[in-house]
Image: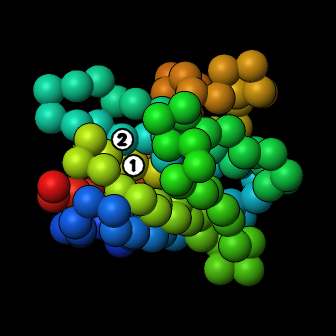
Amino acid sequence: VQLQASGGGLVQAGGSLRLSCAASGRAINNYATGWFRQAPGKEREFVAVITWGGGTTYNADSVKGRFTISRDSAKNTLYLQMNSLKPEDTAVYYCAASVSGGLRASPGRSSLYDYWGQGTQVTVSS
């Protein structure tokens, strides 16, 4: 599967953005799909994941109540709705897909993701 992320940009603190990740090559429902982010000088950080059937989502504590992950099977696209953005949310955001059953126990482990999209920059100004 190939993944193409888009939707990043510059927004003021308290604003919203919606990231998209268009999948091609295979149906996105065949994978657990998630978002990670990486700020300058920091390690890549788990943000959220939605499981194969789309019935379960996991979110990092830092984004709970503000970010929502979803998936549109008809459009073969993954989304990340980001509300109440903070300057500390500034990062390059990456979408990723996994076929690993180990993801159920460790949804935030980046090494369990098999496919990655290119990043999209999100900048939140104070």
Q: Tell me how far mark 1 sits from mark 2, CA to CA.
A: 6 Å
Q: Residue at x 76, y 58 (%)?
A: 29
For label 2, the crowd category at 10 Å Cα-Cα, with few meaning under 14, some 14 to 19 and many 20 or more, is many
Is label 1 in a helix, a strand or a loop? Answer: strand
Mark 1 vs 2: CB contact within 8 A:
yes
Q: Position of residue 103 (x, y in %)?
A: 70, 27
Q: Quadrant of residue 6?
A: bottom left
* Residue 4 in view: no
Q: Which residue is mark 1?
A: 94
Mark in front: 1 vs 2? 2
Q: Give the quarter of the figure containing the C terminus.
A: bottom left
Left or right, 51 with respect to 70, comes to right
* Residue 108 in view: yes
- Residue lying farthest bottom? 74
Callout 1, which amino acid? Tyr
Left or right, 56 with respect to 8, comes to right
- Picture disc at residue 113: none
Q: Residue at x 69, y 73 (%)?
A: 72
Q: Is residue 45 above or below residue 58?
A: above
Q: Quadrant of residue 84?
A: bottom left
Q: Earlier in the sequence, mark 1 or mark 2?
A: 2
Left or right, 41 with respect to 39, comes to left
- Picture disc at residue 37: 2
Is label 2 in a helix, a strand or a loop? Answer: strand
Callout 2, which amino acid? Arg
Q: Position of residue 123 (x, y in %)?
A: 20, 57
